[in-house]
């Protein structure tokens, strides 16, 4: 390697001058307020608007409906034919099945219990093969759609 030739090197920019030019180019930022600082609200620094009690209650109710629709649209209750636990299932395609386990079902599942007894962690297991068979049976019997026709929970 050859020694560095400093004669053609560009000098480092002045930091203060660089900061001033960035402020001129992009403008100042308005996000440097401190919590508790009153910025026109009711003693809060929150950027969300303050609603009256009636509007806030309606908003909470609408949010709860949206949450329930998003979490439960298209799910069907399916019982495992082997250990009789009940889970919520939605088929999204031939190779894509959404299974919503609840605490009781994951504790009562015989396959998961066997994994836990052998020292394994059932939470790391992809699925219960007995439940997968029960889901296939539910599709074959017409109790569960092979591909859900439920509308997407999206925006309404």
Image (spheres, grey):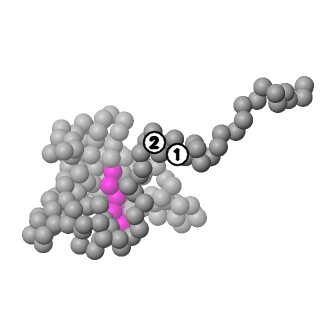
Q: Name the residue under label 1.
A: 20
Which is nearer the eye, 110 or 98? 98
Decide if residue 22 is on the left or right side of residue 93.
right
Q: Is residue 84 at all visible to an observer of this figure?
A: no
Contact, mark 2 vs mark 1 (Cβ under 8 Å)? yes
Using the image, tell me which numbered label, if any, was put on residue 31: none
Secondary-structure class at tag 2: helix
Q: Is 126 contained in the magenta span?
A: no
Decide if residue 115 is on the left or right side of residue 85.
right
Q: Quadrant of residue 83?
A: bottom left
Identify the residue shown where x is 9% and y is 69%.
54
Q: In which quarter of the image is residue 93?
A: top left
Indicate the quadrant containing the C terminus: top left, top right, bottom left or bottom right.
top left
Identify the residue shown where x is 24% and y is 36%.
147
x, y (%) of residue 119?
A: 58, 64
x, y (%) of residue 64?
A: 19, 61
Which residues, given as a range, are shown in magenta? 99-105
Indicate the quadrant containing the N terminus: top left, top right, bottom left or bottom right.
top right
x, y (%) of residue 75?
A: 23, 50
Q: Name the residue under label 2.
A: 24
Q: In which quarter of the image is residue 55?
A: bottom left
x, y (%) of residue 98?
A: 33, 47
Decide if residue 137 is on the left or right side of residue 103.
left
Q: Is residue 116 at all visible to an observer of this figure?
A: yes
Mark 1 Cα shell of 10 Å, populated few (<14), some (14-19), many (≥20): few
Which is nearer the eye, 136 or 62? 62
Decide if residue 77 is on the left or right side of residue 130.
left
Q: Is residue 45 above or below residue 73?
A: below
């Amino acid at each position: 390697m050859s020694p560095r030739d400093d004669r053609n090197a560009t000098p480092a920019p002045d930091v203060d001058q660089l900061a001033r030019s960035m402020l001129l180019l992009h403008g100042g930022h308005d996000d440097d307020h401190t919590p508790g600082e009153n910025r026109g609200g009711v003693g809060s620094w929150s950027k969300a608007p303050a609603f009256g009690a009636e509007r806030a209650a309606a908003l909470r109710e609408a949010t709860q409906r949206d949450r329930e629709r998003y979490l439960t649209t298209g799910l069907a209750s399916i019982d495992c034919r082997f250990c009789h636990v009940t889970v919520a299932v939605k088929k999204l395609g031939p190779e894509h099945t959404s299974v919503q386990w609840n605490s009781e079902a994951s504790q009562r599942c015989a396959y998961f219990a066997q994994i836990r007894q052998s020292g394994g962690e059932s939470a790391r297991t992809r699925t219960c093969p007995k439940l997968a068979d029960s889901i296939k049976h539910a599709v074959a019997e017409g109790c569960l759609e092979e591909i859900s026709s439920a509308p997407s929970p999206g925006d309404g």
